[in-house]
Image (cartoon, rainbow, N blue to C red):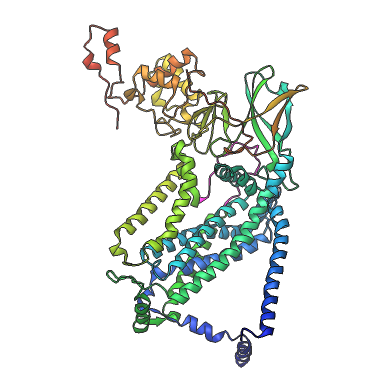
Amino acid sequence: MRLIKQIGEWLDARLQLAAPVREMSEHPVPRNTASWWYVFGSAAFVVFILQIVTGIMLALVYVPSASEAWSSLQYLNHGVALGWFIRAMHGWGSNFMVAIVLIHMMQVFLFGAYKFPRELTWLIGVFLLLMTLGMAFSGQVLRFDQDAYWGLGIGASIASRVPIVGPLIVQLMLGGPIIGGATLSRFFAIHVFVIPAILLAFVSLHLLLVLKLGINEWPMPGRLVRKATYEHEYHELTQKDGAPFVPYAVWKDMFFAAFIIIAVAGCAAYFGPFGPTGRPDPTIIQTVPRPDYFFLWLYALLSLLPPSMETPVLLIGPVIALAVLLLLPFVSGEGEKSWRRRPIAVMTVLLIAVTLSTFTHLAGYTPWSPHMNAWSGQPVPREYLDHRTPLELQGAAVFQLKQCRNCHALDGEGGQRGPALDSVAVRLTQDQLIRQVIQGGGNMPAYGKNLSPAETTALVAFLETLHPAGQQPARDAARAVALNPDEPASGHEPQPAKP
Amino acid sequence: MSTDPTISRRGVLVKLAILFNAAVGIALAVPIVRFLASAITRGRSRGYLSWVQLGPVSDFPEGQTRLATFRNPYVTPTDGDTAETACWVRRLEGDSFQVFAVNCAHLGCPVRWFPQSSLFLCPCHGGAYYQDGSRASGPPERGLFEYEYKVQNGFVVIQAGELPTPGSPTASLVNIKPPCA
């Protein structure tokens, strides 16, 4: 014990770090900031360290070569003791890091912590968010499987839309004319050297600023930030109602960090590593590429935007979003901090959260994608075929064979790209059905060239049987009068569409 | 103080040292920038595109659309499988062909051909194209990318070598036809 103390004193006589470290850890913080709301920043940092450690371990085995990366991941999963667990920790760690960084950002925004004098802390934080997302995307590329390959293709397609320099950006991004060895190598360099170095530097700056300027006090409704008086008021607060960070507040950070690490390890052990999915062989086109969790919302957005809006939104949207984030502390650098008196701030956070989670939820079952195997894998339900004429049965066969089912559901099964057709006969008359099938329109391809007149007749005959038992199919009143002049037309008015 | 001759000589030396370092830095920047930009400049000087053989004409029956694969003409030693490329070959009749990239004109996902309904469907965002490559529905703003092709000594050859993207200059436009019966 005495020896350890002696060694410590010997080291400190030279390093002279003990005093500043003690001063740093015992700096007074406002008493009410020792709150569970203030633990997300340190948790993000701890997960970042976890990512560095697990990342270095993966790099011991991983081969950043387009011809061998996939095999080395398989080897990590199956050939190296606990390789799967380290991969899973790294993958789940990345999900947790993105989530915690976003929660941290939301808390900082709602607590007004970006206001004077902490504007620079916020700006660096925005930059750290971008770098975290950059790590997430480049990490997905390093898991060099089909999703990574086609994900790169999507990235290249987006980048190529930049006016004039788009194709050059694509070549610079891919390291050549195609997605290949050069692409993986440069994403490896970015993921392993460039962004982590930047992250380390800027996380240090971010922390330094928190120490220099003090942690944001618990916002009180009505206590306004004024540039002239704020620093004096904050100083007084820490003097009157302050407590040393260690141990007064730090134990909550420590508990939460440990809890997060356990959660990451738990998810890793229970759910296992992410992929790799199929080999990154571009000639295997039987694939449905999907982005990782944190980019699913973007996947949904790209499916739902009108085509003409897409390029402007993709190219201008991020610029506007970034400008808003960067200008925020300068536009509203003073005034009310408490979220209780900032309804627009709360509504903004809620709106963004609801939007992102709705898009993410939609991307979970991709209603916009045709179900490629529905036509052969999901037969027409039995009750749609009972007591039908031979022509209508033939129509059901045409319906399946021409892959209508890939986009249209029957009885809840099939694609959701187009409307479900269980009650289509109530919505469209015979003539309207024929026209829709032959001419398409409203996001449906025209089938006029691919259906013989006999097939069209049979298909429409089948579609006309698709209405609820109690409801009449829609009929063209004028046509009914022309064909049966004796019958009153009023009885055959088209029924209102089923809601 | 400022008139002290030794101080001003040191000052001049520091400035000279800064200038010297700046010159060395610029000299070093030239190879660094050229190295980093090689992916672009190499493409400009030599060109990535060249003619690639897909197979004998007899591999592609008239009136059908078939998947063909080729190895990208420009490869690096570590490309592995990724240099393999697929394309859709549609033979109309005789020597008349259309060769489409598998990459959707929307965001590059691989489109699949469904001969029963004569449509190309994209699994990602639901783009659909007719058999001649023109846009049928969904988010794509244009038809499928089409390769230049020719028939040489009974073989179908195409001009390829670059990932087709919406902005790439080599992606020749398919005439977008209005959907008609």
Res A40 seen here: no
Q: Which residue occupies 46% across, 36% down?
A: A307
Q: Which residue occupies 69% across, 19% down?
A: B95
Q: Which residue occupies 73% across, 56% down?
A: B31
Q: Please provide the residue range marked out in magenta.
A: A274-293
Looking at the picture, does residue A375 appear above or below residue A282?
above
Residue B11 placement: quadrant: bottom right
Where residue A194 sits: x, y (%)? 62, 60
Q: Quadrant of the C terminus of chain A?
A: top left
Res A235 seen here: yes
For residue B124: magenta?
A: no
Asked whether A309 or A106 is in front, the reply is A309
Q: Please, what is the dominant secondary structure of the magenta stretch?
A: loop
Where residue A262 sits: x, y (%)? 50, 65
Q: Could you tell whether A344 is left or right of B49 in the image?
A: left
Q: Which residue occupies 44% across, 79% down?
A: A245
Looking at the picture, does residue A288 appear above or below residue A253?
above
Where residue A291 sits: x, y (%)? 53, 47
